[in-house]
Image (spheres, rainbow, N blue to C red):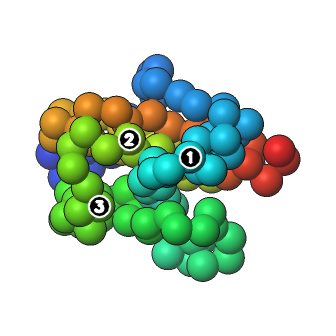
Amino acid sequence: MNLKRFWWWLPFGKVPEIDAGAFHARLQATPPPRVLDVRTVGEWERSHIAGSINIPLTELKQGLSALSADKSTPIVALCRSARRSIPAVRYLKRRGFQQVCQLQGGMRAWWKA
């Protein structure tokens, strides 16, 4: 397997997280964090958090400029079950973003809360 091509393939391990309740509270803050949804376009179209930016994980390297955020702006990455967001958080941190975490449990936790 070409790991450079499939850099997102190993979604295991720990990254900083925020639970759904704390995330909801942060969304009410001024300014709220940027919300990066790394699910597919179809998943995002069916259900998403208002104001989120959809960049599928497999397109994150090419779509990074869509975040248009200062690298000190807080970013919360999410996916359906908090697997695809792990490599997204790692990639953003390697690219110099300072305050990046994932939504613990992903959209499943968000829907449940």
Residue plotted at (50% across, 37% down):
102
Above or below for 85 versus 52: above
x and y percentages locating residue 84 in the rendered image? 47, 46
Q: Secondary structure at mark 1?
A: loop
Is 3 placed left or right of 108 in the picture?
A: left
**Which is closer to the viewer, label 1 or label 2?**
1
Mark 1 closeness class: few <14, some 14–19, many ≥20 residues within 10 Å: few
x and y percentages locating residue 28 in the rendered image? 62, 50
Q: Is 40 or 28 nearer to us in this picture?
A: 28
In space, the residues marked 3 and 1 are separated at their CA atoms by 19 Å
Give the labeled residue for mark 1: 29
The type of residue carrying mark 2 is Pro
Q: Which numbered disc, 1 or 2, marks the residue that appears first in the sequence?
A: 1
The type of residue carrying mark 1 is Ala
Q: Locate residue 24: give its quadrant.
A: top right
Query: Which residue extends farthest top?
Result: 14
Give the labeled residue for mark 3: 67
Mark 3 closeness class: few <14, some 14–19, many ≥20 residues within 10 Å: some
Q: Secondary structure at mark 2?
A: loop
Is 36 placed left or right of 94 in the picture?
A: right
**Which is closer to the viewer, label 2 or label 3?**
2
Q: Is 85 or 12 nearer to us in this picture?
A: 85
How many numbered discs, if any?
Answer: 3
Q: Is 49 or 4 nearer to us in this picture?
A: 49
Mark 2 closeness class: few <14, some 14–19, many ≥20 residues within 10 Å: some
In space, the residues marked 2 and 3 are separated at their CA atoms by 11 Å
Give the labeled residue for mark 2: 74
Q: Secondary structure at mark 3?
A: helix
Residue plotted at (83% across, 44% down):
113
In space, the residues marked 1 and 2 are separated at their CA atoms by 12 Å
Residue plotted at (37% across, 36% down):
100
Q: Locate residue 66: give its quadrant.
A: bottom left
